[in-house]
Structure formats: structure tokens, C-alpha cells
Amino acid sequence: MAAQTENNSSFFTQLLNNLSQCELCLSPTRQSLFLCPECYQQLPVPLSCCIQCAEPLAIDTEQRLRCGQCQQQPPHFDYTQAQFEYRPPVNLWVTAMKDRRQFIWAHKLVRLMECQPPETLTQVDALVAIPSPSRRLWWRGFNPAGVIASLLSQRLDIPLLEGALIKRQGLDQRGLNRRQRRHNLTTNLLAGQLDLNGQHLLLIDDVMTTGATLDVAAALLKQQGAAMVGTWILARTPPWPDNGR
């Protein structure tokens, strides 16, 4: 019996040690994150990006600039907090959560987002998750943005609004350019019936591609009275090469 107890203790000790290993290099790390400091510094962070849509800029500057697209056709959201570019290993972690249903990655991605929250976080009244289309929700069984938003709400003690955005069935956004995404969204993403008068809201999603989804969502929140809408995402895709933005 004593030997069995000792073996069990050894097993759980080894399990805890494994949990505190770096996901990439397996060296010891802080258990609250999952990456060692060296690997964390190697994650794909844009040198500089637009302060409104977070699209990576062609120049390396510490100035807070807006890209040409946001200057010519400003989106309805007021700012974007994006920590990484959507490329390895970040994109692989997102795929593991969304398409392989490895829910542990939702917790890990939230920890990454918490490492660099928006500067306006203390001014935010509530979080709003981007809803999934019904077909995608049926296939996955969960809404990735909703899971992330729920975890952030619990950890940061910020309310999560339900019913502010309503998603009907539409085409999958993957593979569509900005113009196609907007057309798909304007007929399938609807405003709720909430009184958001004067509120500062923060839209939550895992990845921004063209920004069309978040743009339409921000417009719908402002139709319900929101005074300011920011977006908080884990990663931003590189600029699209076509003219369909």
C-alpha cells in the first residue's frame, strides 16, 4: 500500500512538472503561462500596426499610426488590441482549439491575451463575443469567441453581454474577401434589442482576417447606443494581396 501511495505521488508530481514545461522547448516555465520567457519572445509580434484595425504596417515605428484603409474608410470599431500575427505557432494553437476541439487551448490562448490587454480595459463596461453561424456552431458544438470571452469575463470580472448580436445562417466566412464577407454579414448578423446607451464595449474574437465581421458587429452595437467599441483579438492575419478588402 505504501509503495502504491508513493507511486501515485510520483505520478502526480511528474504530471505537475509536465504542466509547467514550455509548450515549445519543454524547458521549465511559469505554470501560469505555458511558455518559457525565451520562446515567448520568439512569438510572431508585428513590428508596428495600425492602432484602429491592427493591420501590420510596412514601416517599423513606435508612433501610433492609422493605416491608409482606416484613414479612407474608417471601420465602426474605434481601436483594436492584437498581440500577434496569425502565423506559426499561434495559428496552430488556434486551429487546435477551433477545429480539433482541444478546449485546453482556450485557456492557454486567454492567458496569452491577458499578457497584453487593451490600455482601455479599466474603462470597458462589458465584453461582447462574436457569434458563430448556426451551421459552424452545430459542427463544432461551441463558439470559440464565446468560450474565450466567457473566460476573460470570469478572470477579469467584466460582464459578458448576451443577445447584443444575433447570427443567422450564412456562408462560412473562410475564403471570402472583405467585400464578400461584408455582404454575407449584413444579411446574417443582426443587432439585438439591448439598451447600450453610452457604454464602452469590447468585442472579443480569436482572429481578425479582413476586419469585416468586427466592423459590422461594431456598427450594430452602436446602433443600440454604444458610445465606443473596441476589439480585442489574439492575432491578426497579414494584409490580403487582393483588392477585395
Image: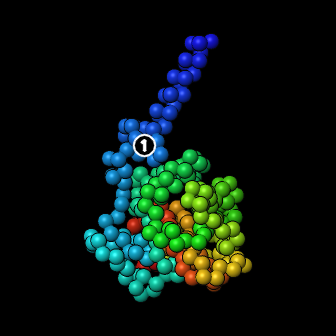
Q: Nearer the viewer, residue 107 or 120?
A: 120
* Left or right position of 196 against 181: right
Q: Residue at x 49, y 53 (%)?
A: 111
Where 141 sits versus 178, above or below?
above
Q: Position of residue 181 (x, y in %)?
A: 55, 75
Amino acid at dot 1: Arg
Label 1: few (<14), some (14–19) or many (≥20) C-alpha neighbours in 10 Å: few
Where 7 sits versus 222, above or below?
above
- Residue 159, by quadrant, is bottom right
- Residue 192, by quadrant, is bottom right
Q: Which quadrant holds the N terminus?
A: top right
Q: Secondary structure at mark 1?
A: loop
**Residue occupied by mark 1:** 30
Q: Position of residue 16 (x, y in %)?
A: 50, 33
Residue 183 in view (yes/no): no
Q: Position of residue 78 (x, y in %)?
A: 48, 79
Where 4 sits versus 159, above or below?
above
Q: Position of residue 241 (x, y in %)?
A: 39, 72
Residue at the far bottom in the pictured view = 72
Total numbered labels placed on residues in the image: 1
